[in-house]
Image (cartoon, helix red, strand yellow):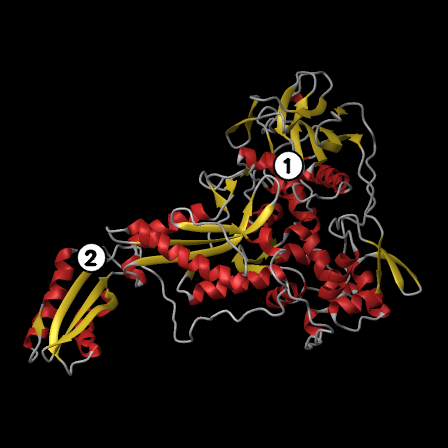
Amino acid sequence: MKVSYEWLETFFLPAQAGGVGTLPSVAELEQLLTFHAFEIEGVEEVAGTSVIDIDVLPNRAADSLSHRGVAREISALLNTPMQHDPLKEEVNLTPQTDSIVVELDTDASCTYYTAAHITGVAVGESPQWLQKRLEAIGQKSINNVVDATNYVLFNIGQPTHVFDAAKFSGQTPNIGTRHARRGEKISLLGGVEAELDETMTVIIDTDSDTPLAVAGVKGGVRAEVMNETTDIIIESATFDPVQTRKTSQALKIRTDASARFENNVADELAAYGVKAVATLILELAGGQLQGYATAGAAKPANKEVVVTASRTSKLLGADITDAIMEDIFTRLEFSYTKNSGTFSVVAPFERRDIQIPEDIIEEIGRVYGYNKIESKQLPLAQKTPGINKKFAYAELIRKTLIESGFTETLLYSLRDTGEVKLKNALASDKGHLRSNLKDGLRELLDTSEKNMPLLGLYKTVSLFEIGNVFTNDTEEMHVCVAVRVTGRKKKDERTLTALTAIKERLEEVLGTTLQEPIGETLEWNLDSILESLPAIDAYPDVPTVADAVSYKPFSNYPFMLRDIAVWVPESTTEENVQEIIQNHAGDLLQRCDMFDVFTKDGRTSYAFHLVFQSMDETLTDEKVGVIMSGIEDEMSTQDGWEIR
């Protein structure tokens, strides 16, 4: 939210009245709010005033998405009184009027609705002070009536809307609410036509049953205020936060109003909003206030929350005395009573986030200052936690497989098929929870086989995963190993042999019998055999990655594979040959793996797989051919070397 520094200053006492005169500098405010309240996204100069971009998180959106809310926060943190607080003035919606009627559908989302009727207004240009304040925070000035609603929105945080009363069907304007009908359409301000459904609430002209606005989101053009408008109705209401958010998302329309309603602004704020807008319009556009009409009722004020100094000190890790707590409650304007060290606290009506003792303790911690809390080493555990049998055996299986040359994988739990279907799928191929591990590992075998040279594998891919699978009835931990042996001859037979060997090894380690492998995988339910396994008294040491291993980004471009074999004098080492290869290949050489070596008649034959890949482009046969020619040419000049 963008906050004008000049606008904030209007809330504080002038110097001659005994106050601080002006706020601290923008830099000081930025530091104060960052360490005690909100994150600051940035500061910019707009039309001669500093504008602070404050990131107000959802838990504070109900009270702090306004200049008043930020000013109230600054007042508490600086322990400096505000010149005036518009939410501390008593609101009296009088006189009541029968010149307009408000009726609420009890099934719709609106529970409290207030309206003001003003006649004889003169719609025109807003004064410069108002235009400047709105434009500083990125709001375009429209006219004095609409600008008044926007000013109040950003001043105290209550969204309001103005209708042209002359555009209602009846002789007496009759405002109501109801659920929209499926397929019903409304033309919204800004030129958007929205198609509605029965999950949404609309504000209607009751006499014609015509929608005038989408509740909590945006007004329609049917009762739009124009330059010739003289008779207006100001609405200020409370709308269900969940339904408002769902409506905003469904229509793909997010407004300043919906951002506040979806964060559960206080019901009591509606009365302050309609009163403030009516007062400002009378000042800017003239007219005669006919009165107010109200339907529904505001929800009860915030409930009492009980907290103690001892509990607060324990959670914060600091010595928080009763006196400190009382001081902070006073600064935050939390009312409280104290009885034998126990505080019963009630937050102001706009603080909808204060519901449990931990909320109070968080407030004390941030106002007190987390930087004042001494850093201490956590005490040693009083007892040694017991061994989790499932995790211990999972570690034992992991250790056995890694030592046997298998690579662990961690795959998505969301797949295109499964017993458990998601109500709101993340993607078309992620609409179910997986019911086994083997499907994912089979797909990974395909991918790994295509990239075997890059992985340094040339005959066998050996993978495993330990993870949870889901059925309609339960969640289980499974183990699955997968093997693929490449080559044309006896591929299936060699795969089965490899799976059988690891199965026997695991059975020996676990002391139990596992089911037979199917195809290229062996999967079993670890939970189902856990009770039959003997107790385990320690977690096994799982092999760790060597310190010399480094990580780097992978290329999105395909690799190219070349083989080279050369006869060299028996005294020539593998490293001597690799040095020549590396000098010509440079950064394009991703792997150089020796796959054959033998000695005959005083000479040694070395054979290498060379894997080329670029981080920037797709390699061509021509480019790799030039590299290979350079390697072969230099090898040919070496005494006693011969390309095979």
Residue type beneath disc 1: Thr
User: Which is nearer the eye, 432 or 69?
Assistant: 432
User: Circle 1 is placed at which residue position?
Assistant: 244
Tag of residue 88:
none
Examine the rendering and report whether any part of residue 1 can be seen.
no
Circle 2 Cα neighbour tier, 10 Å, few/some/many (<14 / 14–19 / ≥20): some
Provide residue 498's location: percent of width, then percent of height.
37, 57
**Which element carries disc 1, helix, strand or loop?**
helix
The quadrant holding residue 454 is: bottom left
Residue at position x 17%, y 55% from top?
A: 620
State how far apart marks 2 and 1 are (Cα).
54 Å
Residue type beneath disc 2: Leu
Residue at position x 60%, y 49% from top?
A: 133
User: Which is nearer the eye, 248 or 26?
Assistant: 248
Q: Tell me if residue 443 comes above or below residue 36 in the rendering.
A: above
Residue at position x 58%, y 64% from top?
A: 392
Looking at the rendered image, the disc whose residue lies closer to the viewer, 2 or 1, is: 2
Provide residue 332's location: percent of width, then percent of height.
78, 59
User: Circle 2 is placed at which residue position?
Assistant: 619
Q: Is residue 423 left or right of residue 579?
A: right
Query: Contact (CB < 8 A) between labels 2 and 1?
Result: no
Provide residue 43's location: percent of width, then percent of height.
54, 60
